[in-house]
Image (spheres, helix red, strand yellow):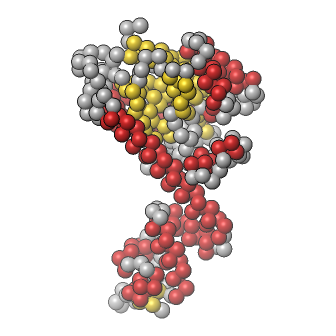
Amino acid sequence: MLTIGDFARVSRLTAKALRRYDELGLLPPARVDPFTGYRYYAEEQVERARLVGWLRRIGMPLAEVGRVCALYEADDAAGAARAIRAYWVGVESETAARRDLASSLVDRLKGPTDMTTPPPVSPSSPSPFVLRAAVRLDTGLVRAVQQDAAHAGPQLLAVADGYGPEGERAATSALTALEAVPRSAGSSGAARAGDVLNALEDGVRGANDAVAGLSGSGTTLTVALLAGNRLALAHVGDSRAYLLRDGVLVRLTRDHTVVQALVDAGELDPAEAADRPDRALLLKALDGGDVPPEPELAVREARPGDRLLLCTDGLSALLPAEDVERGLARGDGPDATAEALVALARDLGGPDNVACVVADVVPAAS
């Protein structure tokens, strides 16, 4: 038997950490002296202690550490390895989302206004732009139930792709929870970028709360908010937002899926991603959990003539980017464009529900 001091030296963990892991049931000592309370550890526990230490060094939460250790000690080394890989894929996805936000903020700071200075309109002036939008929902040709939902207003656009036995309710509840976001973000042109992003983040938390209690169900969520001349985005899951500007299509969101994380890490060719059977395996979704997922956030300048597309993967997984670009650039209004994009998905078999929002940024007076 090893004393806690000896065990700490061998395992490279501190005595404080060992006491904490004992309290959590993660690494209990083999024996505790009933009179002195001293902890004693068996030599066979060294391997588990070292594994715990390594997993903590990569930032794995304690609950997940316990699961990996249990798999390893049950002679399921492959399962333990998969759990570690899945955790790290999630870390890389989070890092990529934060990198995009940092890049967005840097671009904003280098632009004509900084993060705290409002655009050049008076605080009492109305927003210089609005969104002229159209929504199309389609059940598709295979699914019997519509679990996608969409919202389109003069400031707020959103799509949600529900899953599970109460997926339809999850998607609609999430969108209903977002209705207050434009008011909390400030509807005037003087809304600050930080205020807009904070309002969106609060809206995502509210949407997650709205999904709570729907057993085994959840939803993706992609939101675009126009405040002044700023377009802010919040995104969780694999629904998407696109921007067409001057005839060029730009994808504004990154899928929060295992496959996309493998592509980001250079372990999977993008051309192979669409054919993977686990293409839709989500790393993030709103499921009503106590700790809501951290949304991917971004803010950019909005310009008159910009066209936005928000859609669920029933559309984006079927249509190549060039088809999306052609469909948005045809010159039709939002209503006809949304109708045409949904028709293309149906022509390709319509295997999934579709939620599609097409919106043009136009001067508020028009």
From what the image shows, is residue 157 above or below residue 4?
above
Q: Nearer the viewer, residue 187 or 39?
A: 187
Tell me the residue at 49%/71% (across/down): 54
In-image side of 14 versus 287 (left or right) = left
Q: Residue at position x 50%, y 23% from top? A: 245
Q: Nearer the viewer, residue 307 or 246?
A: 246
Q: Quadrant of residue 214?
A: top right
Q: Position of residue 192 (x, y in %)?
A: 29, 30
Q: Say which residue appears at 44% left-offset and 24% top-offset.
A: 156
Q: Position of residue 202 (x, y in %)?
A: 37, 37
Where residue 203 sits: x, y (%)?
Answer: 40, 35
State whether residue 141 is above or below residue 12: above
Q: Who's the residue at 35% across and 76% down the image?
A: 16
Looking at the rendered image, the quarter that the C terminus falls into is: top left
Residue 338's place in the image compared with 263, above or below, is above
The location of residue 147, given as percent across then percent down, is 62, 31
Q: Quadrant of residue 355?
A: top right
Residue 192 in view here: no
Left/right of residue 50 with respect to residue 270 in the rendered view: left
Q: Is residue 205 left or right of residue 195?
A: right
Q: Is residue 20 visible?
A: yes
Report the number of discs.
Answer: 0
Q: Quadrant of residue 183?
A: top left
